[in-house]
Amino acid sequence: MMLISFIYNNMDNNNTINRNLHSEFAIIMLLKINEKGAV
């Protein structure tokens, strides 16, 4: 949860790198949720 807050806070400066990090992290989280069968 701390990592999610950290990434969201860094998005405030509209940094493209931080946006990409958030996108990749969100995709990874969705894949992990799908692996658990919560489709």
Image: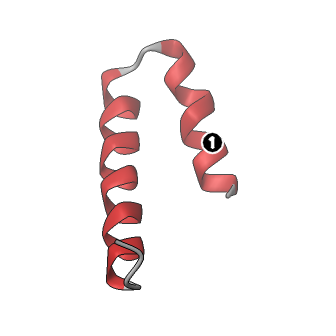
Q: How many marks?
A: 1
The front one of 38 and 10 is: 38
Residue at 37%, 84% in the rendered image: 37
Residue 3: give x, y in percent of width and height. Answer: 60, 54
Residue 31: give x, y in percent of width and height. Answer: 31, 69
Write down the residue under mark 1: 6
Residue at 30%, 37% in the rendered image: 20
Residue at 41%, 85% in the rendered image: 36
Instruction: Using the rendered view, name the quadrant where residue 38 is placed.
Output: bottom left
Residue 15 vertical position relative to residue 37 in the rendered view, above or below: above
Q: Is residue 13 left or right of residue 31?
A: right
Q: Residue furthest front?
A: 39
Q: Residue furthest top?
A: 13
Q: Is residue 13 left or right of residue 20?
A: right
The front one of 35 and 23 is: 35
Looking at the picture, the colour scheme in use is: secondary structure
Q: In which quarter of the image is the C terminus?
A: bottom left
Residue 27: give x, y in percent of width and height. Answer: 31, 55
Q: In which quarter of the image is the N terminus?
A: bottom right
Residue 32 vertical position relative to residue 22 in the rendered view, above or below: below
Q: Residue furthest bottom?
A: 36
Crowd tier of the residue under label 1, counting other residues whose Cα lies within 10 Å: few below 14, some 14–19, many 20 or above: few
> Circle 1 — which element?
helix
Residue at 69%, 54% in the rendered image: 2
Q: Which amino acid does label 1 sit on?
A: Phe
